[in-house]
Amino acid sequence: MTTEGNLTDDGFIIFRDILPSSAIDEARAAMTDPNVDGIDYMRLQEYIYGFMIKSINTSLNWNADFVKYRASDGNNSADASVWHRDVFSCNSGRDMVPSHTLLSYLDIAHVNVLVGSHKNMSLNLADALVQLITKKKTIEMHPGDLMLFNSGLIHCGIFVDVGQNHRRLIQVFEVYPSRTALREHDRNVLHIKQWSKNQMLQTLSRFYIIISVLNFFTYLTVSTGHGFVDCIRKKYYSSEGVRPRLTVVVNTRQPDNHYIMMHTTTDATEEETRRIALLTMEAPNVFYFSLCMVIVLCIVVYVKKTRIV
């Protein structure tokens, strides 16, 4: 096993070849059955606890616990294909989020991160552009690798890889070094359940130019502190985007790409969810789109006037 990155400074660490091939085969069997659709979540949880969590416990001397997870096969692009943080601060805008996300890919895949972006939840526009240009890193993940990163690290999945029949991924969210740490910090998190059922981004994520443009505006929103965000009850927000939750049924295969909750959480009301979605994503995105259009228009007008002169 080898490692890449530093959890404190870079915001992520990758454990290469930490999982045995037999464990990967077991996880694939839990996720994919040629005869039956859906995931065997109880079987998958054995993989999560017995291999993913156990591996980071051994490597980091943790006794980790986590809030939720989901498993998908390329269809998590509806919310994972644009720059985002899994948890973000809503008060000072500069607090480092004290939780982590753990990833296990069962197929070769790529993910983009902005190195060190977890250290500041709210940059000015100039610094945000510099960060996007200088700190972007594309990481290739292989079956058997684990990636652990700060929940506040800005990242996005890449879904335009060609020749890939599968992109099976297990995401474990809000991983804490211990159950005590989870109880201490999760009480400061407001969980935002599915706030939209629009799956359009899942289709658009396959088109490089379109997703790149959308990604730019979303990045400006995320890196500059989510625009008009204000605190509603809690210090941090954890959004579940456009995907619903699911209650696991034993000995039954169930749909993938749903959130499976492992602990009781403090959830936003429907009214709070609509307000948060409007203030933290929709309004800022429209603002930055409009700002860019004005800048482009000014450039066009200037060029035309220059040519006339």
Image (cartoon, rainbow, N blue to C red):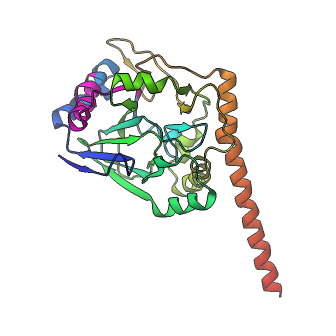
Residue at left offset 47%, top offset 38%: 97
Question: Is residue 236 visible in the rendered structure shown here?
Answer: yes
Taking depth in this image into account, of 48 and 246 the one nearest to the observer is 48
Taking depth in this image into account, of 271 and 234 the one nearest to the observer is 234
Q: Quadrant of the C terminus?
A: bottom right
Residue at left offset 59%, top offset 40%: 200
Residue 230 x %, y %: 67, 35
Measured along the vertical axis of the image, is residue 42 above or below residue 231? above
Question: Magenta stretch?
Answer: 46-69
Q: Quadrant of residue 150?
A: top left
Residue at left offset 67%, top offset 47%: 285
Residue 290 x %, y %: 74, 55
Residue 30 lies within the magenta run: no
Residue extending farthest bottom: 309
Residue 64 lies within the magenta run: yes
Residue 164 x %, y %: 35, 47
Residue 91 x %, y %: 61, 37
